[in-house]
Image (tube, rainbow, N blue to C red):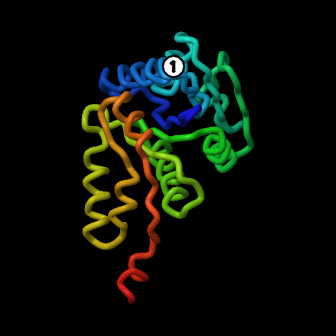
Amino acid sequence: MKRICVYLGSNPGNHPAYIAAAETLGQELVARGLGLVYGGSSTGLMGRLADTCLAAGGDVIGIIPKRLVEKEIAHQGLTESHVVNSMHERKQLMADFSDAFIALPGGIGTLEEFFEVLTWNQLGYHSKPCGLLDVNGYYACLTDHMDRMVQEGFLVADHRRMVMTSPNPATLIDMFADYDPPHVDKWIEMKKGL
């Protein structure tokens, strides 16, 4: 593993634990010699994570669509910056550069980006680990809902296990080292013979 892609808020959130988690993750990445791939913003948790990595001597790749350069205030001090034409191009390039994916607290964009790359994993487009950094119980309702998806027959249990979760960055990255992607079909009715 050389680089980890992190999806997270361009806002800081309402609890100091979110900023602290971004800083701790940044320090952990650099301590392990892992580069950061992220959305290229200088604001919110995104900016704090990038600044922490850079201050500790880490490599940071930012990828941001032209349309968001001014809105999210593109970070000017990154190791490598890519300005792309669309969100689709951004997400694909982030995935191409990365060996694993982590979502910290964030909004709709954070969830959308994480779930897209998780779906690619489910469908076999890649086999890279995906995890939620569950700061302050932020993702508890989401993981409960994914458990319900399994109970209701919309998600295979092996695919539910693709989402590793921890409140601790070091623990989550350690979990990635042991990741064994599932080798099951997504389609439940094929398993049941429906």
- Where residue 185 sits: x, y (%)? 46, 71
Q: What residue is shown at x 65% (from left), y 34% (from top)? A: 63
Relative to 129, does residue 61 appear above or below in the rendering? above
Residue at the disc numbered 1: 30
- Where residue 190 sits: x, y (%)? 43, 82
Relative to 5, does residue 46 appear above or below in the rendering? above
- Give left or right: position of 23 versus 83: left
Total numbered labels placed on residues in the image: 1
Quadrant in which the N terminus is drawn? top right
Q: What residue is shown at x 36% (from left), y 62% (from top)? A: 158
- Give left or right: position of 50 versus 111: right
Relative to 50, does residue 97 appear above or below in the rendering? below
Q: How would you rate the neighbour count of disc 1 (Cα within 10 Å): few for under 14, some for 14-19, many for 20 or more?
A: many
Q: What residue is shown at x 44% (from left), y 39% (from top)? A: 177
Quadrant in which the C terminus is drawn? bottom left
Tell me the element at label 1: helix
Residue type highlighted by circle 1: Val
- Where residue 71 sits: x, y (%)? 61, 31
Observer-nearest of 84 and 162: 162
Q: Which image quadrant for residue 147?
A: bottom left
Query: Farthest bottom residue?
Result: 194
Q: What residue is shown at x 53% (from left), y 18% (from top)? A: 53
